[in-house]
Amino acid sequence: MTCASCVSRVERKLGKLDGVTATVNLPLESAHVTVPAAVTDDQITETIAAAGYKATIRTPLYPATVIEAGVVSAPDETAGELPTRADGAGMRQHASKRGTSEHAEHGGPAARGGDHTATHPAAKLRPRLIVAAILTVPVFLISMFPAFQFPNWGWVAGALALPVVTWAAWPFHRAAAVNARHLASTMDTLVSIGVTAAYAFSAWQLFADPRMTDHQQGMDSMEGMGSGGLYFEVAAVVTTFLLLGRYLEANAKQKAGDALKALLNLGAKDATVLRGGQEQQIPADQLGVGDLMVVRPGEKIATDGVVVEGSSAVDASLVTGESVPVEVGPDSPVTGATINTSGRLLVRATRVGAETTLAQMGRLVSQAQTGKAPVARLADRISSVFVPVVLAIAAATFGAWLLAAAPDISDAELRAAFTAAVAVLVIACPCALGLATPVGLLTGTGRGAQLGILIKGPQVLEDTRTVDTILLDKTGTVTSGHLAVDGTEAFGTFSAARVLRLAGAIEAASEHPIARAVAAAALSAERRDNDAGALPAVASFRSAPGGGVRGTVGGRVVTAGRTGWLEENGITPTAAQLEALGKAEGSGATAVWLAVDGEPAGIISLRDTIKPGSPAAILRLRELGLRPILLTGDNAAVAAQVAAAVGIVPEDVYAGVLPEGKVEAVRKLQAAGATVAMAGDGVNDAAALAQADLGIAMGSGTDVAIEAADLTVMGNELGQVVQAIELSRRTLTTIKTNLFWAFFYNAIGIPVAALGLLNPMIAGAAMAASSVLVVANSLRLRSFGR
């Protein structure tokens, strides 16, 4: 496939099959096809063959796998094998792929014995480009500059140009011939006709007057382009420029797709498993759910799992985009392809193959890259009729010039008519139009994958542009979801430091989240005050679920917990102490008592910690024109305290909202005319994410939330949500800029060429440059976020 016309024809042919829908992507050279159960694989490939292309389909290693990054190969290329998947409701989805020695599945490419080896398009074009350039330079110099001319130089120019317009230009001629057999036309048709016409016309002129390039005569008749009616240099230069454009375009497209290849290559190739007490090394794709993996410092975790033994810091930057390693220990979930940086870990595999986070990321990115934004449909509709219209314009141009010169048409007027017609053919090639959307999308989604941002599809780009309100779930999105000690109040002779130390000692024996937070704060304070500090030992420990804990520390009976637990242990706080507790809880904190030997000694306040980047992220959302609204199931006091800390105004706080209330909140805002985005991470957010105009799932959340969302942020910071919106908008802007210049270029170029104001050589250079500029503009997205 070479241009938007190819894309349109393949989609149109497949669409004629009953119940079939197809989306073809030009830079990926892929087709994503959804078919009813009644349509066979052979019917799909035969239909593509009828359009002049080849494709094959292959069943994947894992039935659930969908890596839709394949290829509809050009007519002369060896067809490879393709992934396919079974879907519900009697539908199948296919992705077509050119022959290759590697196929991306379950997080990493695997060599397939017997697959055909694919040569990168740029490598195929390189020898043709080199030969064309070497031969074109002398043709151009001889034809354009009298100083380089010699007797009968035209014959030499014709001989040198012949390999350029035949062998070097063969990809254009071959594609044009295949299309002609199917009564179709593409940009290759325009190039082939233009180049062939220029060379054939020149050869006819030369044979009609073999002495027309006698040296002296050539000097005297420097009409037109300096060749006295010969266009060998036009045919050669146009071919060379177009090959150069194709070559640069192929290289750029490869770079645009590198992000997805890099993502799929992240997975570990091998894993060390523990079987029968013995360590064994096996290929990562042979791992099963429940396998125990040994992960040493510096090694990649082979698949998603849960830490069974050991503690370490895991570098998840390759997957989440977050640079700070995450501390893990027993029961901590870990993701495949992340790197264990310090301690030895024993990890139990929970998801393998197509179900892993990495495979899901690859699936989402490739689905997004294969799709089309609504803005791209206009380009497709235009390109489907573009080439026949251009051929008609070129013929009309030629006729109009001759008609204007009638009845006595001189050689100079014939040459002028011919020059204008060839320039129209060359300048009109719609390559830039076909590349404008998919290359921008390819680069934007690829860069997003590197940053831990997954864009589900092109429609999402349009949605991010129109969103004006964003609902933020408090816990896990704005805050960490983890309690931390916020303050300590001491009574009587006790100091705040002693209250925290005693509370930490007694709570250290408990597994409750509040107990863990208190113990962590006490241990941190102890180590700060004493380098070798440790909390006192506890004796006679007992705990009551939902109540509190009790034990003996340093010979004194210490009790910690809620008011009811104190009363159960015969401890009665004074009115002033109860007032202090009420004040702490009224500010939105969770408060627990500490009593020593039956007397209240102090109150410890805990709060859900606000993520460090949340205030700055809220500010950036406002700068993007979005209205941030805080949504939480917590009470109004907690919600107000968090909102004030991050910069959300009180009227934009929705507190005490149940899961079903989140959906209602989205609907209410939509009914009021807002275009709503929703960011959340839990199962209870899934319905609201689906209801919102733009659903954004935090990747630390559940699969259900990720499935319901349009954008997924693999990291855990609100700043990445902002970055995801910025990247989506930047990608859409890039695509629209590409389309504008592609349309503008053709709209201006064709009339200028028809009026005879454009040299075909300059037209060829401009046509090649337009494609390269569109791709180069898209590649600027690779620097986003740096």
Image: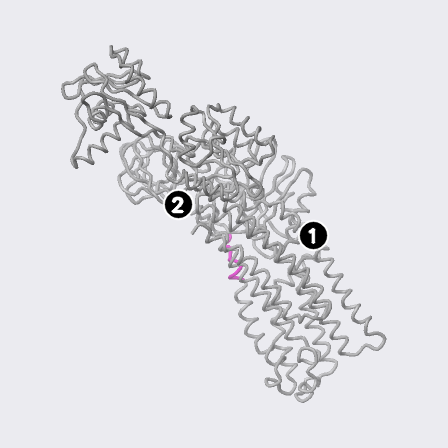
Q: Is residue 367 visible?
A: yes
Q: Quadrant of residue 368?
A: top right
Amino acid, disc 1:
Ser
Q: Which mark is residue 487?
A: none
Q: Write the start and end of the magenta stretch as one range.
A: 116-124
Label 1 neighbour load within 10 Å: few <14, some 14-19, many 20+: many
**SS at circle 2:** helix
Residue 647, how many percent across, how many down?
43, 36
Toward the left, the furthest residue is: 555
Task: Kindly report the distance in space between the C-alpha atoms of the residues bearing marks 2 and 1.
Answer: 41 Å
Residue 502, how many percent across, how many down?
20, 24
In this view, 284 is above or below 665: below
On the rendered image, what quadrant is the N terminus found in?
bottom right
Residue 139, how many percent across, how many down?
60, 77
Label 2 neighbour load within 10 Å: few <14, some 14-19, many 20+: some
Toward the front, the furthest residue is: 576
Residue for point 78% across, 64% down: 396
In this view, 153 is above or below 80: below
Amino acid, disc 2:
Leu
Q: Closer to the camera, 717 or 631?
A: 631
Which residue is denoted by mark 2 in the rendering? 318
Residues under numbered marks 2 and 1 in contact, where contact means CB atoms less than 8 Å apart: no
**Does the magenta run of residues contain 358?**
no
Toward the right, the furthest residue is: 407
**Does the magenta run of residues contain 117?**
yes
Q: Is residue 63 visible?
A: no
In this view, 99 is above or below 759: above
Which residue is denoted by mark 1 in the rendering? 384
Q: Closer to the camera, 340 or 757?
A: 757
